[in-house]
Amino acid sequence: MDLGMVGGKSYFNTPALDVVAMGDSQINAAFIQADSIALNQPRDCVTDRNCVALKRSLEHKSKDRNVNLVNLAIGGAMPSDYYLMSRAFFTKEYHPKLVILSLSPRSFLDSTLNSASTTETFQFLSPYVDLKHLTNYAFNNSIEKYFWLLKNKLTIFKYRQDINLAGHSFIKQGFNSLSAKTNDKTQEIIFNRLPAQPIYGGNGFVNPGSSVVLPNPNVPFRGNKAEYVKRFAQLKDKTLVAQSTFFIATLQYLKSIGVKVIVVDMPMLPPVRDLLPPNFWQKYSTNLKNKCRDNQAVWLDLSNDGEFTQNDFLDYVHLNARGGQKFVDRLAKFASQVN
C-alpha cells in the first residue's frame, strides 16, 4: 500500500478537517519524528498521519482546542502529485481550511524522475481527474501521452458523467477498506533496520508496521550529498516547466475553492544548497514568491534559515526529531498568523 494512499484513508476518516499537509519525505521526516518524541512511542509512517506535534503547537498558539490535521506527504512526491491529490480529494463543498505545501528545488529539478506520469500517485489518481491542458506536461514523449489519451478516451471520457459522480465515493471506499494490521514478522523487521530508514519513504508498496520511527532523538547524522549530486546532475528544462505548471495549477485550484495555502520552502544544509549556483536561488525564490502572491498563497522560506543547524538534521535535507519540533513550532506560529 502506498504511503500517500493510506494518507488518503486518514483524510477521508477525519471529520471537519482544518489542515492538510502535502509534501515529500522532507516534511514527512519532520512530522513523524516530532510526533514520536511528543508521544514517546513508535509512530508508523503508514498509519499515523495525524501530525500530533503540529496539532498541539497549533492548538497552543491559536487557542483552538480542536484542530484536525492529516499528513498526505509521500516520499518523492512532486507538485504534479499535489495537483492530482487536490483535484481528487478536495471539492468546493468538502475541503480543509488550510493546505500546507512543502517544496524544495528537488520538487522542480529531480533528474531521476522520468515524467510526472511515472509516479504511483499519478497512476492511481489520474483516472479520476480531468487533466485538460496539463496532459501536455505529464509526459516526456508523445507516444506515452497518446497511448494514455487513447486509453482514457475509451474508458473515462465515454462515461465521464458517471465516473465523476462515482469517483469520489470510490476513492473514499478504497481507502477505508485498507487494513492496518501488523504481524510479528514486520515487528521483527522494524527493530533490525537502520533507525532513519523508514522516514525516507517513497512511492511503492509498504505494509503497516514496516516503516516505523522510534522515539530516538539521537539518530546519527548521515551524509547524502552524493544523492543530490545525482538528482541535480542534469537540470532538465522540461521537468522544471512541467512541475512549475502543475504547482501553479494547484495554487489556482485551491484558491478557486476557497482554501488558504501556506507554501513552505524546506530547510537544507549548505553542502546541498551549494550544489545549485547563487543565481539559481535568486530566480527560484523570486518565482516562488511571485507565484504565491499571484494566487493568494503565503510563502514561508526556511531553505536557508539560520535557526536550523546540523544538529537538527538526519542528513543534509531531512530534519531529525529536534529539528522536526523546531519546524512544527515555526510552522504553527506562522499558520496561526495567516488570516
Image (cartoon, rainbow, N blue to C red):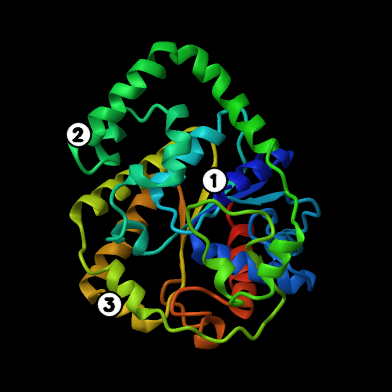
Q: Please name the residue shown 67% across and 82% down the image.
A: 217
Q: Is disc 3 placed on a helix, strand or loop?
A: loop
- Tell me the kind of residue under disc 1: Lys
Q: Please name the residue shown 69% across and 74% down the image.
A: 191
List x then y, in percent, for residue 144. Answer: 25, 36
217 to the left or right of 135: right
Q: Is residue 83 above or below residue 31?
A: above
Q: Label 1, on which residue?
A: 260
> Badges 1 and 3: C-beta atoms under 8 Å apart?
no
Q: Is disc 1 placed on a helix, strand or loop?
A: strand
> Badges 1 and 2: C-beta atoms under 8 Å apart?
no
List x then y, in percent, for residue 25. Answer: 50, 63
Q: Label 3, on which residue?
A: 275
**Labels 1 and 2: the sequence-earlier one:** 2
- Tell me the kind of residue under disc 2: Ile
- Tell me the kind of residue under disc 3: Leu
Residue 254 seen: no
Q: Label 2, on which residue?
A: 143
